Amino acid sequence: MPTRVLHLLPTLQGADAARRVALLCEQLPRDQFEQHVAAFRAAGAAAPRLRSLAAGVHDLRRRFRRDPIAALALRRLARSLNVDVVHAWGAEAATHAAWCGRRVVRTTSDDEPLAGWLTSNTLPFTPPVAWTAATQPLQPTGEAMARPPELPAHARLIGAAAPLVPASRLKELIWAIDLIRVVQPDVWLVIVGDGPQRASLEEFSRLACEENRTLLLGDRGDLPDLLPHFDLWWQSGQPADPPLTLLEALAAELPVVADRCDSAAAVVEEGVTGALIKPADRAERAKSTLKLLEADSRRHADDSCPVGALPSSDELIAACAAAYAAER
């Protein structure tokens, strides 16, 4: 009988967790693993792909952060599916999974706070980075990115992708782009992602900055196709492992400015593929960005960070298979 795995996600937006789960659903042997997906809100750019790959996608229809009805629905779902292991993606998911009566592995970021009881009732698991075919050097498709009227055709674009939540530190990016605007008014920040902070971030970018230079694109499933249109990539926060979006930006040969942390330092070579800065230091981010834009907005990475030096999708699949099997 295959091992039954339930992936618990906050949302099915096209962020890192949902895309990694889709990769697992696609590549883990189906005769050995039966994978289901549950989400607090089962909507987003990754939903169609997950529905085609997973054994089932389940919407918990959570109404607010601590919704007892959603928690009960998760517990009942785990029982009805008779799952062997719940893989909780993120601290919020881990908090709910710990109450569902099944063994739990959790994948959380270093900057996500965890209660003491949660660390003792769930097993930490950091999957290896998956450097898949999707992150090989990308070529422009020839299709122009749709530009709203407020985004000039000649604008130089800085890209970023993250859930619109406080932990993503996106206000720091908006402050930084306002500093850059003073020197280079043609530079815009384009953020891919959605979340509860969207309205407040839109208001913040209008009110806190003299001239708005931030565009929130929302949840997108075509990020690899958008990357060739960017001139530089920003990564904020301190994730436990490098986000897929960061790897894809490097594969697209975009210079990167990232908050200094172990996961970013593992793939960004300072002075070669980008710059590592003190977390939340908007002045240093602006200074490093201006320097990279001036040097070369399409600087190519050299052989010091080859694709082969990073874990492949095979390593991701093997590590997850071992973690799930150990929980039976």
Image (spheres, rainbow, N blue to C red):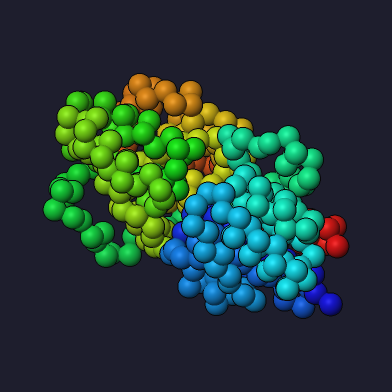
- Relative placement, left or right, of 201 versus 84 is left
Q: Residue at x 59, y 37 (%)?
A: 112
Q: Residue furthest front?
A: 68
- Relative placement, left or right, of 282 versus 154 is right
Q: Is residue 42 visible?
A: yes
Task: Give the quadrant of the N terminus.
Answer: bottom right
Task: Give the quadrant of the C terminus.
Answer: bottom right
Seen from the viewer's position, the closer of residues 65 and 41 is 65
Q: Residue at x 45, y 48 (%)?
A: 163
Give the answer, above or below, for where 60 lies relative to 204.
below
Name the spot of residue 218 as percent of width and height, x first: 34, 55
Q: Residue at x 55, y 67 (%)?
A: 59
Q: Residue at x 55, y 77 (%)?
A: 52
Name the spot of residue 211 as percent of width and height, x first: 16, 34
- Relative placement, left or right, of 101 versus 177 is right
Name the spot of residue 190 as percent of width and height, x first: 31, 46
Q: Is residue 20 visible?
A: no
**Which quarter of the figure has residue 175?**
top left
Name the spot of residue 257 as percent of width and height, x first: 42, 34
**Which quarter of the figure has residue 68?**
bottom right
Image label count: 0
